[in-house]
Image: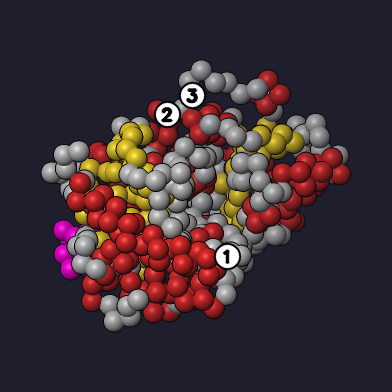
């Protein structure tokens, strides 16, 4: 196939873009903004184990390429994985070289990076790629590295120290990255996730209406996968404590069905809330604006244990602001960089059931105050948390701004 003459910015995922999840939504939005901006054409690269050779397709108008990049370490098969990685490394490097040349790729930006990204590092170390290598972290990626043994941790540090730039979606998460390896501080950049307010509303499913059991109720809404650190149990107990004075309230929780879904269902029954709580899974993103539009308050109750679990930077809060819904959030990773307590919403301590219930009650009982908080949050989001702003910050890390790349001069090499 004939090579493209136009420079491209490659967004790399360790899975298919068709999966649901916050990381994929971030990449979709960045690719869309990249197409609008015009400085680079975006290209999506999926690390696909089923792809024996470069597989080309198009996703939402963006060139999409799948290829297989092995990791030098896997849980339970450390030696075998390393040997296989070494055996296939020449072929992997050749295919990466073909990819970057064929599409004139100037930036390799891996989101939710793992040790397969060492293939990208070696491509540049062998002087087969002269662009920028950027590793973008979202939370569980770097936290997963904390729990590894000595050998994979050593590999992780080689990867971090040889990338041109490391991007964290919040300053709080950036602190977790530098705690893992303090030498990364110089190459670390914080680029917050964003929201395109107009696109968020324009993409809403205009044919969808709220189910009847929600349409006439005062709805408390929370969005997040059913995982322990999302703290749905804390939210449920706070909601239960409100029932005496707010009998018309219902709680709606939307999220991917994960390990805590059954436990959450059981707690709903235990608290006697089966007719008051609705748990929805696998909801298309274009219906989220409709659900937000019917909510009185959005709640983010997440837990945070640095280096173990927590948010990265909650896009759900940005979308709640875009929808005009007042926000109550736990002081989890990244929230303090967005919500100012008593000014643009309410922020309470993590896992504090009483404080969370009081904050929700304050929003419900003081609608004018809550409206002012939301106006302030909307203004802050429009000024500082847009995808346009995020992409501009990424572009500053491109070869046009850093033609040599910090990684090219790093002392610590593989």
Asked if the residues shown at circle 2 and circle 3 are in contact, with their CB atoms under 8 angstroms apart, the answer is no
Residue 304 is at least partly visible in this image: yes
Q: Residues within 10 Å of mark 2 (few under 14, many from 20)?
A: few
The picture quadrant where one finds residue 264 is: top right
Q: Position of residue 30 (x, y in %)?
A: 34, 45
Q: Which residue is mark 2?
A: 203
- In-front residue for pair 273/365: 273
Q: Is residue 284 left or right of residue 221?
A: left
Q: Residue at x 28, y 63 (%)?
A: 123
Secondary structure of the residue carrying numbered label 1: loop
Write the start and end of the magenta stretch as one range: 396-405
Q: Position of residue 313 (x, y in %)?
A: 49, 55
Which coloring applies here?
A: secondary structure
Q: Is residue 125 above or below residue 131?
A: below
Q: Is residue 302 left or right of residue 262?
A: left
Of labels 2 and 1, the one closer to you: 1
Q: Residue at x 33, y 72 (%)?
A: 162
Quick one: label 1 or label 3, which is nearer the N terminus? Answer: 1
Q: Position of residue 291 (x, y in %)?
A: 57, 31
What numbered label is drawn on residue 77? 1
- Taking the magenta stretch, the answer to whether it contains residue 374 is no
Q: Is residue 405 above or below residue 377?
A: below
Residue found farthest to the top: 207
Residue found farthest to the bottom: 411
Q: Is residue 360 above or below residue 292?
A: below
Q: Which residue is mark 3?
A: 205
Secondary structure of the residue carrying numbered label 2: loop
């Amino acid at each position: 196939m004939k090579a493209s003459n136009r420079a491209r910015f490659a967004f790399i995922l360790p899975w298919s873009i068709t999966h649901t999840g916050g990381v994929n939504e971030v990449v979709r939005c960045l690719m869309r903004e990249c197409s609008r901006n015009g400085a680079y054409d975006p290209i999506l690269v999926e690390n696909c184990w089923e792809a024996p050779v470069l597989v080309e397709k198009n996703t939402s108008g963006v060139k999409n390429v799948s290829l297989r990049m092995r990791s030098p370490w896997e849980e339970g098969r450390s030696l075998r994985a390393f040997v296989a990685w070494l055996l296939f490394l020449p072929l992997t490097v050749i295919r990466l070289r073909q990819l970057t040349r064929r599409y004139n790729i100037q930036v390799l930006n891996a989101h939710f990076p793992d040790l397969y990204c060492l293939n990208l590092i070696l491509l540049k170390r062998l002087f087969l790629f002269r662009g920028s290598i950027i590793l973008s972290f979202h939370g569980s990626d770097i936290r997963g590295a904390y729990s590894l043994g000595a050998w994979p941790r050593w590999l992780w540090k080689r990867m971090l120290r040889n990338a041109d730039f490391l991007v964290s979606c919040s300053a709080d998460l950036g602190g977790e990255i530098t705690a893992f390896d303090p030498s990364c501080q110089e190459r670390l950049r914080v680029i917050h996730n964003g929201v395109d307010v107009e696109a968020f509303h324009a993409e809403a499913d205009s044919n969808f209406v709220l189910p009847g059991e929600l349409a006439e109720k005062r709805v408390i809404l929370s969005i997040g996968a059913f995982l322990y650190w999302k703290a749905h149990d804390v939210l449920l107990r706070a909601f239960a404590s409100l029932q005496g004075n707010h009998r018309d309230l219902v709680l709606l929780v939307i999220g991917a069905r994960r390990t805590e879904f059954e436990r959450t269902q059981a707690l709903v029954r235990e608290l006697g809330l089966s007719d008051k709580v609705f748990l929805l899974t696998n909801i298309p993103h274009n219906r989220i604006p409709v659900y937000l539009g019917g909510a009185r308050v959005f709640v983010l109750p997440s837990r945070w244990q640095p280096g173990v679990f927590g948010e990265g930077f909650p896009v759900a809060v940005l979308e709640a602001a875009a929808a005009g819904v007042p926000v109550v959030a736990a002081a989890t990773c990244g929230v303090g960089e967005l919500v100012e307590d008593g000014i643009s919403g309410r922020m309470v301590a993590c896992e504090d059931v009483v404080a969370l219930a009081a904050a929700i009650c304050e929003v419900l009982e003081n609608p004018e105050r809550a409206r002012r908080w939301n106006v302030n949050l909307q203004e802050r989001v429009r000024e500082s948390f847009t995808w346009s702003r995020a992409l501009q910050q990424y572009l500053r890390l491109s070869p046009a701004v850093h033609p040599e790349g910090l990684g090219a001069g790093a002392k610590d090499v593989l």
